[in-house]
Amino acid sequence: MAPHQSLLVIDDSEAEREIMAFTLGAAFPEAEVSRADHPFLGKAMCEEQSFDCVLLDYNMPDMDGLTLARELRATDPYLPIVLMTNVGDEMLAAEALRSGASDYIPKSRVTTESIQRTIGRCIHTCAQTRLIDEQRSELENFAYALAHDFKQPIRQITTFSQLIAMEIGATQAGGVQQHLKFLSDAAGRLGKLVDVMSQYTLLHQSPELAQVDLNCVVDSVRASLSPYLAERGGVFDAPERAPTVHANETLMTQVLQNLVVNGLLYNRSSTPRVELKTKRRGDDWIISVSDNGLGIESQHLSEIFNPLVRLHNASEYSGTGLGLTLARKAILAQGGDIWCESVLGAGSVFHVRLPSAPEARKGPRDRKAARPLHSIAVGNRP
């Protein structure tokens, strides 16, 4: 602990307040120790000046230590706070940490060494928390600005591909027209992805959920991956009619695309094949994406969703090591779950659980009264 730092003891008992001040003086000879005999006075002192650590009693008149800790934490989220009590109760300790205290120590265990360790640990932890939050804020601001800047070139790609299509005319170069449409559609999907990532990844906001027709998601993935499927000689099979789920269409497109690409990439078959199936389970849908690829050893199944985990040499199989991590985060953000079953050499199956669309959860009587939707009929198919 650096010299000339300031400590505050808040305790309504004069004897215990002086004992603690004496102990702090022995533990931190260079520190300035202030005293408050009432929680209101202690709170006022914290509002008027900055303390490096506040030690407060649990049993005090008008306001107990837990309430005071909550109010001090609301004012300063990085203030080191140590709760002291005569009651060595683990439940109280847990409640203290939930209330905003940095640590907890029974008065019966206070010694020069123990209080030195406790306060030093609290100050270090709060300082590190502040540093992490500041770095996270800087990174989020940078990422948000970057995402914002992405929108301009995306708009330009869309606009100029449309202008080129108009210039060459509808009757000329039909293949080029199709490529330009693919380019414009891809730019549109990229724009939506940037918007969603800005909402839930950068700003920690929950993604907007709605009824999502998986048929549209499959069509989008198939269109996006058609060049790669042709290059790999691969096959992507999906049911003619897929259900409607309660999700975010852009995130689901990215998740499904990631799983299909993985199935095609990590695959030595002459005809890489990825198959999508759906199955109803209560109010949820299980979306299973299977492949005939390399498979994953059982001891690695618990690791594959961790960031930067690569099970293969980068020179043999390209990738960032973040695809499955982002897929899992996206599924969890939509109130679902994702897991994998695999046999080495026999391929893998990724299962995604998502809630069904609210309309599809209604009973037969409710469905008669509801406005008929295509997604309801689709949702009843296994």
Image (cartoon, rainbow, N blue to C red):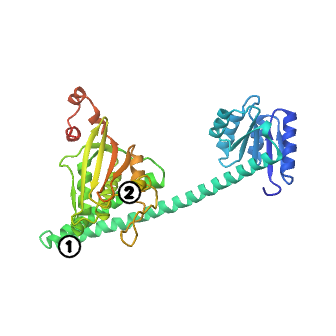
Question: Measured from the top left, where is residue 339 in percent x and y?
Answer: 37, 49
Which is in the foreground here, disc 1 or disc 2? 2
Question: Measured from the top left, where is residue 148 in percent x and y?
Answer: 43, 62
Give the residue number, with chain letter if any, for mark 1: 167
Report the quarter where the C terminus lies.
Answer: top left
- The circle on residue 208 is none
| Furthest-top residue in this view | 365
At 39% from the left edge and 73% from the top edge, which residue is drawn?
A: 315
Whether pointer 1 and pointer 2 mark residues with C-beta atoms closer than 8 Å, the reply is no
Considering depth in this image, is 84 or 269 the residue closer to the camera?
Answer: 269
Whether 273 is drawn above or below 19: the answer is below
- Mark 1: which amino acid? Glu
At 46% from the left edge and 56% from the top edge, which residue is drawn?
A: 306
Q: Earlier in the sequence, mark 1 or mark 2?
A: 1
Whether 305 is drawn above or below 162: the answer is above
Report the quarter where the N terminus lies.
Answer: bottom right
